[in-house]
Image (cartoon, rainbow, N blue to C red):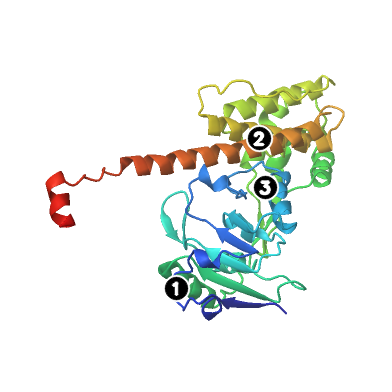
Amino acid sequence: MRQLQVVHRRHRHHRGQPCGIGAWRTGAGWPSHSLRPAARRIIFTTASKWDGYAEGIIAAPLARFVAGETQVVVATDAIGMGLNTPARRIIFTTASKWDGYAEGIIAAPLAKQIAGRAGRFGKHETGFVAGFDGLTHKTIGALLRQKAEPLPNNGFFVAPSLKYLEAISQATGEAKLKALLGLFAKHINVHDEFFLPANLSDQMEKAAWLDALPLSLADRYTFSLCPISTKIPMLENALHDWAEQHARRKAAPLLRMMGTGGRNELQYLEDSCKLYAAYAWLGYRLPETFPDGEMAQLLMQSTSERIDSLLQVQNAQKRKGKRGDAPPRRKPKAGSERRRSR
């Protein structure tokens, strides 16, 4: 059974005192919650913010850490989603996180989930957790000591499978995907309140235009689940084009995005990565129409590396700019130098 301890005397840091640079040792993970979306892509990407990314995006830096090629992983709170890493210690740079509306202290379950990455059975029997500064160290310690809240009575969301929708279609004679999804949401029996109907609004929005294409119910169902954001016009248009190509029984080659289209370079690269991820997802399920799935995964990885390089350059420029803003030191007058020398 792995033990989890708050770091104190082992690294010559007492409780409530900053962890400091001295704790940077082999096998350290650094969750950074307060980083804004652009900067949060240092190593890991949170699924809630960066939907549509494939597992390969975080596989490369994680593999380097597991292989011992890197000694420290700087990560967002996505490190707590269950990734198996040989990290001996987790050091929180902050205990707060931007939730999309305001900055606030992270929830105790999230803190415990992240802290649980410290230690590995058979390699590090004891995991160590610390805060980078005194306040963070004290806050994280308090969060880890909080008692777990009782599990809610409900919490499982139910969405229809293709087989279930086909059964509804056979029983009702309805062939439209949007209508079938609506029937499911209306008549699903969740009287025990343990299961809840899933939010199908995004899927139904896609189904509305997919029903106008000469596609089978199975194909429309697949395209409706494609993990691509319809809030970005470029990505939504790509999904439309892919579905039309499939309806015509034509292959949809992977086209690289050319030109930023008025976006900054970082946003352009992020959108490109989402596009490649969606293509790879479809390529796994419909390989005849999407034959370039492996190429899409390679482009995802190379684009992710370009994003990391761009962030490093931007951070270096910011540090250089801060040094340049410092007021110049005044040179002492010649007379005063002579007086001091005497």
Q: Nearer the viewer, residue 292 or 339?
A: 339
Classify 267 as above or below 199.
above
Query: Residue at the location (65% across, 44% down)?
Result: 200
Residue bearing mark 2? 303
Rendered-image quadrant of the N terminus: bottom right
Horizontal side of 262 relative to 192 (left or right) equals left
- Residue 91 is situated, as x and y percent measured from the top left of the image, at 55, 65
Amino acid residing under circle 2: Thr
* Mark 3, secondary structure of its residue: helix
Q: Is residue 107 visible?
A: no
Amino acid residing under circle 1: Lys
Q: Is residue 66 visible?
A: yes
Classify 107 as above or below 320.
below
Residue bearing mark 1? 138
Mark 2 or 3, closer to the camera: 2
Rendered-image quadrant of the C terminus: bottom left
Horizontal side of 327 relative to 52 (left or right) equals left
Q: Kindly indicate whether the residue at mark 1 contacts the one at mark 3 (C-beta within 8 angstroms).
A: no
Residue bearing mark 3? 185
